Image (tube, rainbow, N blue to C red):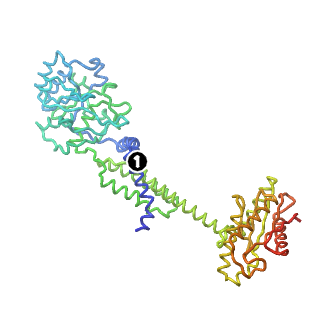
Amino acid sequence: MSKFFWRSLPGWIAMLIVTLLFFLGVFQPLEWIIYNNLFRMRGTINWDQRVVLITIDDKSLNQFGQFPWSRQRYIELLNVLDQSQPNVAVFDIMFSEPSPDDVMLVKAMEQHGRVVLAQAWDNKGKPWQPRPELEQAAITTGHILMKYKDGDGMLRRVESQIKGIPSLGIAALEAYNTFAETPPLKNIENSLWINWISKVEDMPDHYSFVDVVQQKIPREKFKDKIVVVGVTAPGIDVLTTPFDYEPPTGGVCVHATIISNFFQDNFLDLFPPGGWVMLLLLGGPGLGWTITHWRTREKLGFLGIISIAWVVFSLLMLKLNYWLPVAAPIVLFATTTGIVALREHRKIKLDNQALQYLVNYDGLTQVANRRRFDEYLQQEWRRMEREKSYLSLILCDVDFFKRYNDTYGHQAGDVCLKKVAQAMTQGVTRPTDLVARYGGEEFAVILADTDVEEAQKIAEAIRSQLKALAIAHGSSEVSQQVTLSLGLASTIPSADLTPALLLKAADEALYEAKKTGRDRYCVSIKLD
């Protein structure tokens, strides 16, 4: 279980990150963009033939003048529609101001018998209703409030009811039900997620207001239909849809679309909560567990495949009237893949560092080994040659170490060497100083930018650190404790000299320290 959790841990982390970002609304602008493009990729679907749209467009304004119009225009329209009974006339127009023609409009509405009027609320929540006499003459009213416009100006859902008042589209369906059978109104207590159909101009039964009142459209076009009337002329009642955005259309398109969605039973359904849980688990821990140990190219290739597959799947689901999130899942896949890759990169880096340590450091004493010593001596020699500064070298040998091993055993000898290395490390202070195990019981110290006087102080500091440890050595001829003999050489590197000469000089100084009694350091005066 712990192995599975550790392997899938990047996915759990990605899942938490994406969930947090989702609730913070970070993905929403991306989802809006993708939503619009998915609709365009899906293409248009069929309008229901029982819906007719009559628009107050530029052509109508050019004929009848600036909007708003006299009530007489709508009386003319109702007279035309009355000749094509039965039908429902739905006005996405507010008749809230009094007019001398209200009496005649009331008569026309009563003559028609199935007129649905619009109502709304202002910003303070005050009702904005038709004139009382007009409202009484209407078969019903419906709200036209579009309170859920998103940040990009797009309307994606409407409230089916507000304060007990149905939306204009639902009110129209209720009126239509008085003479024709309609599908059951399901889930009308919830928000309605609009399934956009096409551009308004591509709607088969879409006519200009002026053409209708001038009776250029056959009367049978309106029989047994819901006729929705509203403004699409620019700048009056602007609405952007995935299909009508440059230029936008009018708000009347919403109500026509809602009615068609009801007839076709193709409102959008959202991604269910259970689907979210499954997606998070599969796209997070599941994906993290799967791609662990894959090569980077394989990870990136798989990320591309599942991202494209999700977009295609979302498009197919939109054709089936489901709106699936796209940005959040793809970010989840990418985040999981990225965290897995970063973890494995870090692991490889740590492994390489560990390997590099094993290559360059002595396993027993944990100081640099001979290989690292040779590399570092060459490196610092070149650096000091450029800087024309001193480079000093100290070679150290544990006095009578063979006798120590014979007396105390090899395990004790190993412990002794560790302590000697510890004392030497404590005797140097700068990051550029290198303590190395030179071989067996021999150690070396490379001191860059250090002249002979400073090097002697460091040599004495190393001896003092070792004496402070007081490592017993009963077989030594010079002390009852472990001691060191040290050879020191120092020079300013130049093209005429080599590191080998410095090493030779330090070795000769070490030999001199042993020869003259051990437990001391000697200095080589010059390099030959």
- Classify residue 202 by image quadrant: top left
Q: Is residue 477 above or below residue 139?
A: below
Side (left or right) of 490 relative to 278:
right
The kind of residue on which mark 1 rests is: Leu
Q: Which residue is mark 1?
A: 21
- The image shows residue 101, relative to residue 303, as above or below, that is above
Q: Residue furthest bottom?
A: 406
Does residue 163 appear anywhere in the picture? Answer: yes
Q: State whether residue 198 is above or below residue 528.
A: above
Apparent side of residue 209 relative to residue 82 in the rendered image (left or right): right
Quadrant occupied by the C terminus: bottom right
The N terminus is located in which quarter? bottom left
The residue drawn where x is 20% and y is 31% is 227
Residue nearer the viewer, 122 or 72: 122
Helix, strand or loop under label 1: helix
Image location of residue 282, percent across then percent down: 38, 59
| Residue density around tag 1, few if under 14, some if 14–19, many if 20 or more, within 10 Å | some
The percent coordinates of residue 168 (x first, y second) are 21, 33
